[in-house]
Amino acid sequence: MDIVYTIWLRSMKRYVRSKSRIVGSIAMPLFLLVFLGFGLNSVVSTTSLGQQYVMFLVPGMVAMSVLFTSVFSGIQIIWDKQFGFLKETLIAPVSRIEIMFGMTVGGATTAVFQGIILMVLAVLLGLRITNPAGFFIALGFMILVGISFTAFGISIASRMEDMTGFQLIMNFVVFPLFGLSGALFPISSLPGWLEPITLADPLTYGVEGIRYGLTGVSPINPIICAVVIAGFAVAMTLVGAYLFRKVSV
């Protein structure tokens, strides 16, 4: 497990030293939360939400922060390929599975930190977590989302050589995943033909799990959310491990 810890520690040091990365990853979710949330607060009907629209948005923005940070942590693999660090790592007498797992844990940890920062800012904007256990429930779902999409990003990055191409593909995949997750509007308000698509989106279960932890309400049973997102995390980790074993430098 030393290699897992070492790679995790490298990810954490890079994260702490990159102030622009921290600010940049927080800026867009916070912008949407403040301007979209307060701007539409009196426009969007809150009858079905049981709360103000801006507070409904909080779990979605937390999930957005975790999602984007975790997915784009996969770009580190391409960066390491180009600068030779990955080659030096792969020729070391350690398992590639351990290397991949260290990258996944490192990316997920930084993503969860980003989510926690946004959650603290949301509390300053008026979010009230009525049940203290709700914070830990939301944290658990944030960890699962972080692991899932860090492994997903690593899976894609393992088969690519170009950072620009990786970013384009991730944007093409990530924005639909986020838009269909119920992060911006309640699932109950969607047209009937769109609801099955939303329920097929694995991020939906992460968003609703976080929503249950922070607000105490969710249209999907939190146990179902936990089972689905945990299963997705395991599946993506296995796929990522398989593809990373075949990576060439």
Image (cartoon, rainbow, N blue to C red):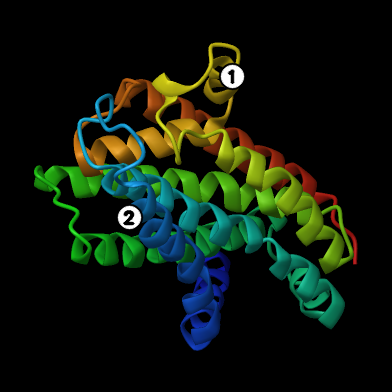
The answer to whether one can see residue 48 in this image is yes
| Image position, residue 183 (x, y; %) | 45, 40
Q: Amino acid at mark 1?
A: Leu
For the residues carrying marks 1 and 2, which lies nearer the camera in this image?
A: 2
Query: Residue placed at 47% from the left, 78% from the top?
Result: 23
* Residues marked 1 and 2 touching at CB (< 8 Å): no
| Image position, residue 195 (x, y; %) | 53, 18
Q: Secondary structure at mark 1?
A: loop
Query: Residue placed at 73% from the left, 52% from the top?
Result: 170
- Where on the picture, by quarter, is residue 211? top left
Residue that badge 1 annotates: 194
Residue 38's disc number = 2
Asked if 189 appears above or below 167 in the picture, the reply is: above
Q: Secondary structure at mark 2?
A: helix
Nearest the eye: 66 or 195: 195
| Image position, residue 89 (x, y; %) | 74, 73
Q: Amino acid at mark 2?
A: Phe
In whole angstroms, how far apart are the C-alphas of marks 1 and 2?
26 Å
- Where on the picture, by quarter, is residue 73? bottom right
Whichever of callouts 1 and 2 sits on the residue coming sooner in the sequence is 2
Nearest the eye: 101 or 16: 16
Query: Residue placed at 87% from the left, 57% from the top?
Result: 160
Asked if 231 appears above or below 170 in the picture, the reply is: above
- Where on the picture, by quarter, is residue 173? top right
Q: Residue furthest top?
A: 192
Residue density around tag 1, few if under 14, some if 14–19, many if 20 or more, within 10 Å = few
223 with respect to 207 (left or right): left
